[in-house]
Image (cartoon, rainbow, N blue to C red):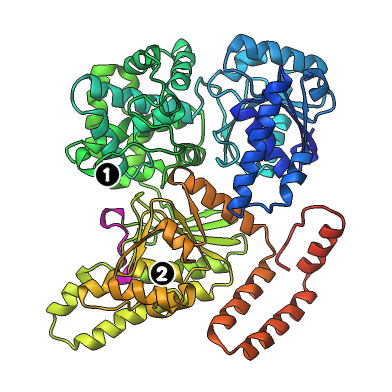
Amino acid sequence: MAGKDVEQIAVIGAGTMGHGIAQVAALKGFKAILTDVSEEILARALERIRWSLGKLAEKGLIRVDEIDEVLGRIRLTTSLEEAVSESDIVIEAVFEDVSVKKEVLRRVDHSAPKAALIASNTSSIPINELASALSRPDRFLGMHFFNPPQLNELVEIIVGRETSHEAREAAISLAKRLGKSPVIVRKDVPGFIVNRVMVRMLEAASHLVETGRYSVEAIDSAMIYRLGFPMGAFELADYVGLDILLGIMRVISARDPTLKIVRIVEEKVLRGEIGAKAQRGFYSYSGKIYERPKISPSLGASVDPALLVAPVLNEAARLIDDGVVSREDVETALRLGLNLSKPIFQYLENLDSTRIREALRIYEKELGPAYAPSPILLELQKTPPNRGEIGEISIVRETPIGWIMLNRPHRLNTLTLKMLEEIETAVRELDKDSAIRVIVLKGLGGRAFSAGADITMFKDLLAGEEDKAAKAREISEKFHCAAHTIESCQKPVIAAIDGYALGGGLELALACDLRIASDRSELGLPEINLGMIPGGGGTQRLVRLVGPAKASEMILTGERVKAEEAHRIGLVNITIPKESFDNEVKAYALKLAEKPPLALRAAKLALRSAQETHIREGLAMEKLLFGELFNTQDLIEGVSAFLSKRRPEFKGK
């Protein structure tokens, strides 16, 4: 069974992961059969799927009328044998217990078609152990989805000793058809990629706490505000669930003594302090959804960041050195699995390599040889990779999305003239790339999209002897050129705003077609407070977007608006909880990328005409573009797909 031939997917286990996987399958047009031991469990799973689909519809990621279509592709049954008997692939997603999984896999092996692919969603148990329960280990492998599977795009494909090449390729193909980014675990090790690195990170961070070097809060503060991680090690542990983490540690440590059970995690689980879901773990919670602990940026000021990131870098390097995974896949896995804002080995470029080696020597002395610097890590430190950086930005091609990352996190991604030129270059480059359908602008560092222009520009200007007015107009023109390049790009451009979007940063976002903001974001044009006015197009684009009354208020007072207010007045299109921001931005971009490229370009031209010309000229432009689209293959494909009730596949022709 090849991945492209899969039509029906059976999911065994209707818990958090199981019902999420079934939902993903149904969303992508597959028939999904979900099975568990009772009707009550299945009914609860279906309600959760319905709720999740409703949330996706609220955010515009699917149409409301699609909800019933998706639910119609999901069938429920308490009979495992019925579920698997005619399925092309069976994904086991039951409780993380070797004996339970083996028993389920034996039953699947007995009833599933001989050509069916069988996969386990295990998060840590070696695939070779589970394969011993099957008469056809060549058709078996791991497909480890990440929570929540509806939003997280990562899937670890774990290959066992006897997994056939055909089975591996089928799993990769299926993962891509499900809209996921598969990474290949070539050598079956307990914990695979992400969980091994996460446990190593928590082991080292806990050692720093247990030895009295730093507090839990100080470590998390440094990881968030100094290293740019989306969460600190202990906040992440609370979010995952300390009981879940303890289970992962037990699985890994029983098979690999170099990774140990963390004592303070074990103690908290014994006391029932298992994280956010129990309202108490390393932090206390009130029970609100997506609640985050309040961690002060100042607490991490004295923490040595090398002590925090060195164990993560070293474990990732060891996985490469041991032949478990390729460098590209380990970086993809950690970026998506831990929600990092940049590839993990980029930290080698930002931190002193000597200090990283010293940090590892400390751990090696105190925790054992597992922390000895990996030879691969030492080599990577000597030859840092070219990651597509132009200078002050990074370009990441993640087909069909092109990411432009503003990369001055230490200055809240404030804009320099050099960065503006680099943004123009990047937009033009991605606009020419036929594989890229959508462009996303995003700020790195987890604190700001961009806090505006770098004020040192104006300081230097005011201190000079040349014509200040003429020089200021040149700076304004640079901003106008960058904004115009974004605005005139043929592809949709999204501004992903997480944190501050102020001054020139907001003006850059105003030039984008869509603005998506995290719920903690703040937006504003505060130039008036410096004795200036917006000079990057803000006085013109803001009026067109929110109307003259609100634009006047924002510009004349210089006051910021929070994300909720920005959404209410139409300044941003969507607001998303911080915890799921990156995943939902990507899901939105992927949804947009499915639209016909030529029609998107025509729509952009027509919409710009509406803002810039008289209505008669705008209507003439609309008529012209409307007619031209009837000469495209995409329109024929769209109409044909609609009439035959299938998903269209647009080629941009």
Q: Residues within 10 Å of mark 2 (few under 14, many from 20)?
A: many
Residue 350 drawn in magenta: no
Q: Residue at x 48, y 62 (%)?
A: 568
Magenta residues (range):
409-419
Front residue of this view, candidates 574 and 266: 574
**Residue drawn at 61 percent across, 48 percent down:** 56
What's under tag 1, amino acid-wise? Arg
**For the residues marked 1 and 2, what is the alpha-carbon distance in whole angstroms?**
25 Å
Residue contact between numbered discs 1 and 2, judged by CB atoms under 8 Å? no
Comparing marks 1 and 2, which lies closer to the viewer?
2
Task: Decide: is 502 above or below 376.
Answer: below
Q: Amino acid at mark 2?
A: Leu
Q: Which mark is residue 226?
A: 1
The disc label shown at residue 508, or none = 2
The secondary structure type at the circle numbered 2 is: helix
Q: Secondary structure at mark 1?
A: helix
Give the left or right position of residue 175, taking residue 535 as reference: right
Residue sitting nearer the eye, 555 or 80: 555
Question: Could you say where residue 468 lies in the image, as x and y percent from the top left?
Answer: 20, 85
